[in-house]
Amino acid sequence: MSLNAYWAYGLRIHSGLVCPELPVHTEEAGDPDVTFCLLPPSPLESDTLENGYYDVQPGIFRLAVPGVAQFRVEGGCRILIVPLPDVPLEKVRLFLLGSAMGALLYQRGLFPLHGSAVETPWGAMIFVGAQGEGKSTLAAEFHRKGYRLLSDDVCAVALTAQGLTILPALAQIRLCADAFERLGAPRGAHFHVDKFMVPLGDGYCPDPVPLRAIHVLRHSDSENSADWAAPAFDPILGFERVQCLLENLYRPHYLKGQGTQGDLMRLAGLIAQKATLAAVTRRRDPDVVDKLVGFLESAWAERFAIPCLEKRN
Amino acid sequence: MRFGAEDKLSRVQNLLSTELDQETVLMSIDAGAYYGLEGPARTIWNILETPVTFSTLVQRLVAEYNVGPEKCAADLQDFLGKMEREGLLRVE
């Protein structure tokens, strides 16, 4: 088995299968933090899992994806992969780098939010929101304007000696068709499952970035034309902040049974205190995405200092 | 219900909590509901970490706040009643 060394969520990953979605680790020497073990194909045995297709125990997460593979995530440091016979590996990777990796992040005590993140002069900015609110599309627009992306789907917030940071994740972004057209069909893009995969190249930020703000994207369905004039940036206050963070966790049902809910709740309190949480509401119109970048830049410039001059924590 | 002087009071187990500025935020895992506790409510919650009788709770609050025992006991009946209805309080 060849060794593929990658670097994601601040973790050195050695993988038994090639993962073009992950940034390559340049030094192959050294012990990995996480190992992906690809085992020989075998039929699915999901009848042993508690919730039908997944099962959570302290330090052990098991997932059976019908038609794809079985995964076993252990102690935050190993993922065993048993593909079904004759399944294309890109399908397996979709669940490996999504669901299984999400469970691993929980095991490591990180706070995985379901959303995209960009590096800005003010720090890392996260965008969360319900499906279809344009998290990836907005990230793609920032990328087009020259910002480096930290994450497309799962944003891992970590408490480090430098304070709260976002750990960079992927070297590709997944886009739906309209966002793909907006990016102007960049080189190396290909269609994959239901989205376009776009390699980020230099548009990918390889280093952890201090967290500054988390934005909840929302649409206004108001018919009132006055509400259409500009998007709105409304800070979220009080304990709603904690609620908002927990509601936007990645695969929150993977947490129950892990035995770490108390730690995660305390981390939510810390994130709510240190980061700005804001609802960003705009009207349902694709052209607004373009203007939204400028709107957010002004909102940030008004509220935040550029952190390079201030001492953090 | 009215709480008796010797009723033993404590927190229910199925809650998550975190500190946020001047507030303690509780989340009920079963109900998925959130609660914010400030000021005296937060103090009461902190005291309830280990089981106490109603009368001990009154004594400790009187010692900490500028309030007489009768007023304190009456307010506490209301507050603890609300907590119990929300499923946050265990009474033995």
Image (cartoon, coloured by chain):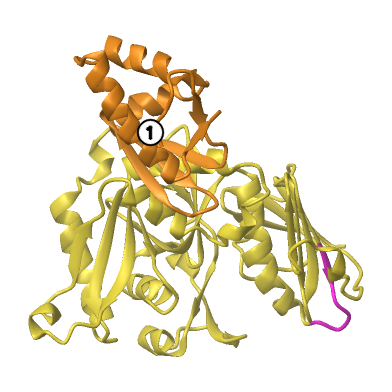
Chain colours: A yellow, B orange
Above or below residue A21? Residue A240 is: above
- The residue labelled by disc 1 is B80
Q: Quadrant of residue B19?
A: top left
Residue A99 placement (x, y as % from top left): 65, 65
Numbered range of the magenta stretch: A81-87
Q: Would residue A216 appear left or right of A39 to someone viewing this image? A: left
- Towards the viewer: B38 or A60: B38
> Which quadrant would the C terminus of chain A be assigned to in this image?
top left
The answer to if A302 sits in the magenta stretch is no
Residue drawn at (59%, 43%), measured in percent from left and top?
A: A109
Residue A130 placement (x, y as % from top left): 42, 72
- Indicate the secondary structure of the residue bearing disc 1: helix
Residue drawn at (49%, 69%), measured in percent from left and top?
A: A201
Kind of residue sitting beneath label 1:
Leu
Q: Quadrant of residue A193?
A: bottom right
Residue A135 placement (x, y as % from top left): 40, 72
Residue A161 placement (x, y as % from top left): 46, 32
The answer to if A83 sits in the magenta stretch is yes
Above or below residue A276? Residue A144 is: below
User: Which chain does the residue under circle 1 lie in?
Assistant: B
Residue drawn at (20%, 63%), measured in percent from left and top?
A: A233
